[in-house]
Amino acid sequence: FDSTTGDGGTWAAYSDATNVVADTDNYVQGGGSIKFDLTGSATTAGISNTSVTTFDITVYKDNGSVFVWVYVNSTTNLTNFILDLGNDLTTNYYTQTITTASDGVSFKNGWNLLRFDFASMTQNGTVTATTCDSIRLYMTKSSGKSDDGYRVDDMTMHTGQYFDCVYYSKYVWQSSAGTY
């Protein structure tokens, strides 16, 4: 998300979004983010790209997650975020809607880390996991919501890692009330 064309294809406005540009002033990782504004005429707005450099979701689709940073200019009249990804954005893609940030709290003004879990995604059509090239990230909002300065940055996929750790504590026993 450092430029509108850096990931292959071109990041374009979706629905009520407009003025999609690279922003090198406000970003989380790399050299920039993708910025867009809202016109206020529709109930959804975001960005999409149907020609991203091909990526493989095989190791993530059973128990992985997609993380993405989103800058929210104003949470007023903002309902949720929706991620669609797959082979296209009309018939063969995964989708999920979330209503909170990755830490389980409400969206806030500023940067929010969003987490989309593949285990909770709905598959539309048949997604070929090894040749995904389409991504759409958008919000649901009221139709009158129009303001500027929404951004998207640093989308990554991860699977969990288990750690078997030995550690020392002076609190060896725990009571039934949870007190150590």
Image: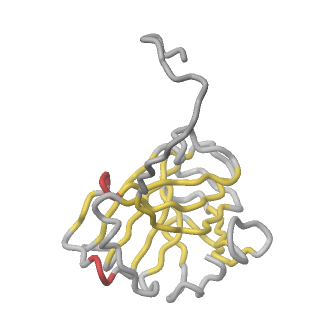
Residue with the most extreme left position: 126
Q: How is the image coloured?
A: secondary structure
User: Residue at the spot x=45%, y=66% of the render?
Assistant: 157
Question: Observer-nearest residue: 31 or 93?
Answer: 31
Up/down of 145 relative to 177, above or below: below
Would residue 57 appear left or right of 39 to someone viewing this image?
Answer: left
Would residue 115 appear left or right of 2 to someone viewing this image?
Answer: left
Up/down of 66 relative to 129, above or below: above
User: Residue at the spot x=72%, y=67% of the render?
Assistant: 27
Question: Residue 5: x percent and y percent?
Answer: 58, 87
Say which quadrant the N terminus sits in: bottom right
Question: Residue 82: x percent and y percent?
Answer: 43, 57
Up/down of 92 relative to 159, above or below: below
> Where on the picture, by quarter, is residue 66?
bottom left
User: Residue at the spot x=54%, y=46% of the render?
Assistant: 101
Question: Residue 135: x percent and y percent?
Answer: 43, 73
User: Residue at the spot x=45%, y=51% of the render?
Assistant: 163
Question: Observer-nearest residue: 55 or 34?
Answer: 55
- The mark total stands at 0
Question: Residue 78: x percent and y percent?
Answer: 55, 46
Would residue 16 appear left or right of 132 to someone viewing this image?
Answer: right
Residue with the most extreme right position: 25
Say which quadrant the C terminus sits in: top right
